[in-house]
Each structure stands twice: as C-alpha cells, then as structure tokens.
Image: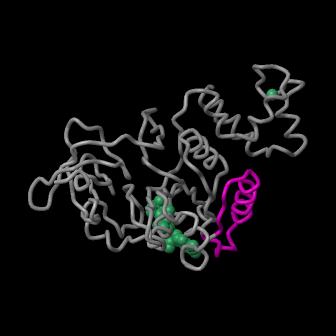
Amino acid sequence: MNPQENQARVIATYGREVVIEDAQGQLWPAFTRGTLPALIAADQVEWEPLEEDKAIVTSLHERSSLLAKQNRYGKTKLVASNVDIALVVIAPEPQPYFELIDRYGIALNNAGIEVAIVGNKADVTNSKHRQTYDEILALYRSLGWQTFAVSATEPETLQALQQSIHGKSTILLGQSGVGKSSITHALAGVEIRTQALSKATGLGQHTTTATAAYPLLSGSGYLIDSPGVRGFHPQISELSELEKGYPEILAEMEHCQFRDCSHVHEPSCGVLAALNAGKIHQNRLNSFYHIRDKLQL
Ligand SMILES: Nc1nc2c(ncn2[C@@H]2O[C@H](COP(=O)(O)OP(=O)(O)OP(=O)(O)O)[C@@H](O)[C@H]2O)c(=O)[nH]1
Ligand SMILES: [Mg+2]
Ligand SMILES: [Zn+2]
C-alpha cells in the first residue's frame, strides 16, 4: 500500500465499530485498534484491510475544530471533528428556543467553527411558534450570523444554502424533528450510503440515532447529520469562554466602571447601558445570565 491508500475518513461510528471511506470512495466496516480513543464522524484515520470486507483503523490524525459537549453526568462527549461550519437548524415546529442557539454559539465560537442558522419548514406559516421562529432568524441575522430560510421539501429554497456549504465539511445541529435528516436527504448522497450504513444505524428510521457524514451532491464537501437534542451543554469552565459566545455583549464590557462588574445592578455598567439603548437584545442577555448562573461562572 502506498501512503495515500491507507488514508480514510470516518463516516459513522457505533461504539468502537465504525464505517470508513477510503481514498477511492469505497466504504468499509472497520474495527478500531484498542489503543486508539473512540472515533467520531469526520475523523481522518489510517487503516489496513483485515479480511475479505473488513478493515481496522490503525491510527488517528490530529483533529481540527473539535466540537464537544457535556453529557448529563458532566462528562465530555465529542460530537464531530474537522468541521468547517455548523448549521443550527430551527423550525416553527417543534418550538424553537433562543437559549439553545446561544448554547451552540458558545461551543462553536470556542471551537473556532463558523455558525449559521437554518430556519427550516419555512412553508409552515400557521404554527403558533412562527413568530418566535421569525424573531430568531431576524435577531441572529442582526448579530452577523448567516441565516437561511428554507423548506427541505422544496429544493429550490435550498440553493443559497447549498452554495454556501459547497466544498466544506458541515454539521447539522438542532432539536429532534426540525428537519436535519430531510435537509441531508435533499443535499447529500444519502441513498448511495444507505446499504453500507443501514445495518448498524437503522437509517430510514424516523429519528436519527448516530452521527454520520454524507458526500454533498454538489460534488465536493460533506454534510454530517446528527441526532436531535433536547438541550445542549457547552463544554466550558471559564467566564471568558462564556463571553466568547456573546461578542456584542463582550464589546460593551469595556465601558463598565468596575472590572468585576456582574452586569446586573451596577450603576455604571456598559452592558446595561447598551441594553437600555437597544444595542443588546434582552433575550441574549437573559441567556447569558442564565447559563452563567447554571455553570456558576
Ligand atoms: N412542512 C415541512 N415538513 C418538513 C420539512 N422538513 C422536514 N419536515 C418534516 O419534519 C419531520 C422531521 O424531519 P427529520 O428530517 O426527521 O428531522 P430531524 O431533525 O432529522 O429529527 P431527528 O433525527 O429526530 O433529530 C418529518 O416528518 C419531515 O417530513 C419542511 O421543510 N417542511
Ligand atoms: Mg434526523
Ligand atoms: Zn457591567
């Protein structure tokens, strides 16, 4: 084997069993060598054939832009590696939450991963949460995030999104039922992977149970579909990491009189002044307070 030939990318993982894609685009079910850590979607690895149609992953390349979260027991859980951009997907149904978006924003800003919001199910106009959905898209657009309003079921609405993720490694994040897999089906070669993946994932099932990467139909780049979440806990331990998720609030802190200002009641607080002047959105500040309290930062 020449060096090129033993390079591969992890497409999906099921515990220590994984599916890898070799340099020729062929998929292999593979074991992970016992000395390696657990692999995650989009990891770059080296591999060797084991027997007829089985392989073993022998080494893991250094990961870039690693997205991690905290599980409910406070343990770090890796979500994906080597990601260029994360699409946080919302929909009018299920009800969207501002704070979930901010929680993703904190993790992604700290990981150095670009973030955009995809408002899916734009065709659903009669939901009682439609106003919240529209407010979320408007707010984050005003904060400089890229936003898209799409319907996974109407391909022509996906063009701008398709263009902006072309050639990139992209992960879809968000609550269960917002349409991450529907978007994946519309933009990526899911069908051609189904056979190789279905054995372990149960693709075709309604709810996604494993994170998996699919090649974009536009020819270059990957779309990583992930299971829906109820909540998301960024893996942070410092106030400065929290603040990184709120650049517009951070920018006002230099106008606070006190260095240890809590931005809640202090008389000459730059953050509260900006809030009163309409330069900071109340929802953003509320989630900042709430996550700071929860994490005791
Ligand atoms: N009206 C409408 N329905 C949609 C749209 N996109 C997805 N749906 C429907 O929403 C439901 C959930 O879609 P999924 O793609 O499975 O959602 P998901 O985010 O992958 O869900 P999990 O895998 O559980 O995280 C399905 O019944 C889809 O048909 C859309 O643009 N418009
Ligand atoms: Mg899904
Ligand atoms: Zn302050």
Q: Position of residue 209 (x, y in %)?
A: 38, 57
Coloring applied to the structure: one colour
Relative to 247, say whether 222 is above or below: below
Confirm whether the magenta stretch covers residue 296. no
Question: Is 285 on the left-hand or right-hand side of 29?
Answer: right
Relative to 52, say whether 267 is above or below: above
Query: Residue 193, located in which quarter of the rendered image?
Result: bottom left
Question: Is 43 on the left-hand or right-hand side of 122?
Answer: left
The residue segment tinted magenta is 121-149
Q: Position of residue 58 (x, y in %)?
A: 21, 44
Q: Is residue 264 among the parts visible in the rendering?
A: no
At horizontal 85% and vertical 22% (from top left) the residue drawn is 257
At horizontal 29% and vertical 65% (from top left) the residue drawn is 25
- Tell which residue pokes out farthest to the front in this image: 2
Residue nearest the viewer, comparing 265 with 226: 226
Q: Position of residue 272 (x, y in %)?
A: 85, 34
Residue nearest the viewer, comparing 31 with 166: 166
Quadrant in which the C terminus is drawn: top right
- Numbered marks: total: 0
- Tell which residue pokes out farthest to the left in this image: 51
At horizontal 85% and vertical 40% (from top left) the residue drawn is 275
Relative to 273, say whether 195 is above or below: below
Question: Is 210 on the left-hand or right-hand side of 97?
Answer: left
Quadrant in which the N terminus is drawn: bottom left
Query: Residue 224, located in which quarter of the rendered image?
Result: bottom left
Q: Position of residue 5 (x, y in %)?
A: 23, 56
Q: Is residue 42 among the parts visible in the rendering?
A: yes
